[in-house]
Amino acid sequence: MELNQLLPIVFTSFICALLSIKIMEPLAEGFGLVDKPCSRKKHSGHIPLIGGLSIYVAVLVCSSVWLQESRTLQLYLIASTLTVFIGMIDDKYDLSVRVRIFGQVIIASIIVNGAGVNISQLGNLFGWGDIELGVLGILFTYLAVMVLMNAFNMIDGIDGLLGMLSLNTFLAIAILFYLNGQYQNVTFPLIVCVALLPYLAFNMKLLKHKANKIYMGDAGSMFIGLTIIVLLSLGTQEPGAAFHPVTALWIVAVPLMDMLAIIIRRVKKGNSPFKPDRDHLHHILLKAGLSSTQALVTITLISVVFCIIGILGQVNQWPESVMLWAFIFLFIVYSRVLKFVSPKVNKRRVNLKK
């Protein structure tokens, strides 16, 4: 797609997201879409949970106006609408884990059985040829949809973090499509990237000192996760695969590793894997003495490095098995470091309080 064709599309995305925020912000309190302080949330006042809604509106408008109509796009938009609706209900009433999972299964069903998104092969992960999943691909896709929806939901812990990690991932996907010559597929991830910018500006209060802060909300984080898994599935599966499935791991590495590591630690402690705590990477960095901005920059840079590794591996055709084992090795190191550091950080905080 030519630059002069792309500019009005991304401009529409930015304006729609910005206007959505300005329109919904004064209405959020009345609809109960606000985040209130509690034992786990130390902010002051009621923060509107409309960031995700603004991104969804921008994507919906741009997709309807600018993109070529297709069954996959239509079913994706239906699944996205349901995702945002369930997320809004969760933001307002704090749904139980069972209800959220049930809703995610329905969403995954629309994507898999309706839109035809199916992760049927995992690439040449062990050096003896592509791994074909067959009928198990449907179950794997269900799992992938739910994992990424929850991974991006769980990483949303400090200002700007979810937005920056999402921005990294969508940019990486756009770059991979571009490098493969699939210029028509570059547009959609760029639409989401631009729609993220107004949210980040308000969330991180970059516009002006008195600008009201907004949060993404569960509606937004689940919508982001759903959109990413759909793009990754379309990018890694035939026909017309643009990059290897193992490359997808690298461009979602931080939220994926953080979710898997935290679930393993919770299970080992005998807790529910869905029980909230303050042992995520950003919590540990904050407890170690980093400011919120420093933690954001640190995690964002880690994410950028992982994305670059994934892109370089794809461009240079590094063996998929090497990319997989490198990812597993880094995950083990990540998990061990956090397991070692977390108790010491907590002990240090207790001593400082004394």
Image: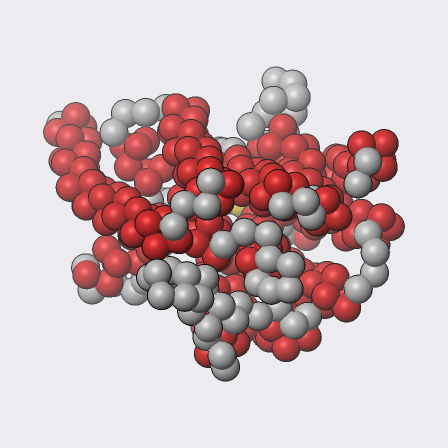
Q: Which residue is drawn at the image coordinates 49% and 79% (left, top)? A: 134
Task: Name the foreground residue: 243 vs 90.
Answer: 243
- Residue 4, by quadrant, is top right
Q: Which residue is drawn at the image coordinates 49% and 33% (left, top)? A: 159
Relative to 294, residue 42 above or below:
below
- The quadrant of the image that shows the N terminus is top right
Seen as rendered, the residue at the extreme front is 128
Relative to 31, residue 284 above or below:
above
Residue 207 percent location from the top left of the image? 66, 21
In the rendered view, does 199 fall on the left or right side of 150?
A: right
Residue 93 percent location from the top left of the image? 55, 60
Residue 59 can be seen in this image: yes
Residue 150 percent location from the top left of the image? 46, 57
Q: Which residue is drawn at the image coordinates 72% and 66% (left, top)? A: 72
Residue 242 percent location from the top left of the image? 59, 52
Relative to 112, residue 2 above or below:
above
Question: What is the number of callouts on the image?
Answer: 0
- The quadrant of the image that shows the C terminus is top left
Task: Name the foreground residue: 109 vs 206.
Answer: 109
Residue 219 can be seen in this image: no
Task: Name the foreground residue: 318 vs 134.
Answer: 318
**Chosen colour scheme:** secondary structure
Seen as rendered, the residue at the extreme bottom is 135
Seen as rendered, the residue at the extreme top is 209
Q: Which residue is drawn at the image coordinates 33% and 49% (left, top)? A: 322
